Amino acid sequence: MIYPIVKYGQPVLEQQAKDITDFGTPELEQLVEDMFQSMYAAKGVGLAAPQIGIGKQIAVIDISTGEDPAQKLVLINPEIVAVEGTQTGEEGCLSLPSFREPVTRGKKVTVRAFDQHGKPWEMTGEDLLARAFLHETDHLKGTLYISHISPLKRDLIRRKIRKLQKADEWS
Ligand SMILES: [Zn+2]
């Protein structure tokens, strides 16, 4: 099923997600599949479980946006183990639609995680993939990309969102 994306303002987006302890269950398989479907439907390159209202340590990434199955990544209980260099580029988030801001992140990032069957894996990504690793693991800690921009810009975005909420255009 395709889940609706939870937008900024919902508490689940700013809470620490819980570790997964049961791997290889039909429920987990289904959730991972649904997360890919929901991500593709929303035209994202990454999606974390809190963004569909589930406070669990699962994220999916596919920087090929469905073009190349080999690039589908399932990150369960992920941990960033190395960050090298920096890159600055525009970043957005499905939970903050229509906003984009430049964010400085690591250029080369190594993540360690489990897949849905409980198999551990580790990968080093660069550029967009490095950014996705950081953005999605942040989500699982309850951190949004706007935490990495200036307080001034963050307040501006919050004010615009409050206006949209009042106009019932943000839910
Ligand atoms: Zn996001």
Image: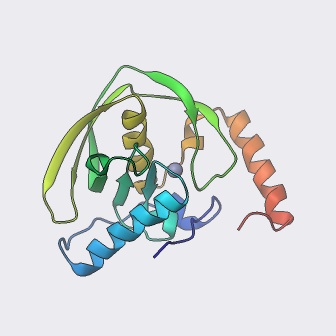
Residue lying furthest bottom: 26
Q: Residue furthest toward the left?
A: 119
Depth order, front residue of 149/113:
113
In x, y percent, where is residue 65? 44, 48
- Pick whichever, 166 or 41, lies toward us: 41
The residue shown at (76%, 54%) is: 161
Q: Residue at x 73, y 45 (%)?
A: 157
- Whether 64 is drawn above or below 150: the answer is below
The number of callouts visible is: 0
Q: Position of residue 29 (x, y in %)?
A: 27, 72
Residue 77 in the image: state x and y as whole percent: 27, 57
Could you tell me which residue is drawn at 65 percent across and 39 percent down? Answer: 100
Q: Is residue 81 left or right of residue 103?
A: left
Query: Which residue occupies the extreme top position in the image?
Result: 85
Would you say 26 lies left or right of 148 here? left
- Taking the spot 45% from the left edge, 76% from the top edge, the residue there is 1
* Res 140 quadrant in image: bottom left
Counting from the top left corner in percent of width and height, residue 93 is at: 57, 48
Furthest-front residue in this view: 67
Query: Camera-side residue: 62 or 126?
Result: 62
Q: Is residue 28 above or below residue 143?
A: below
Quarter of the image where the C terminus is located:
bottom right
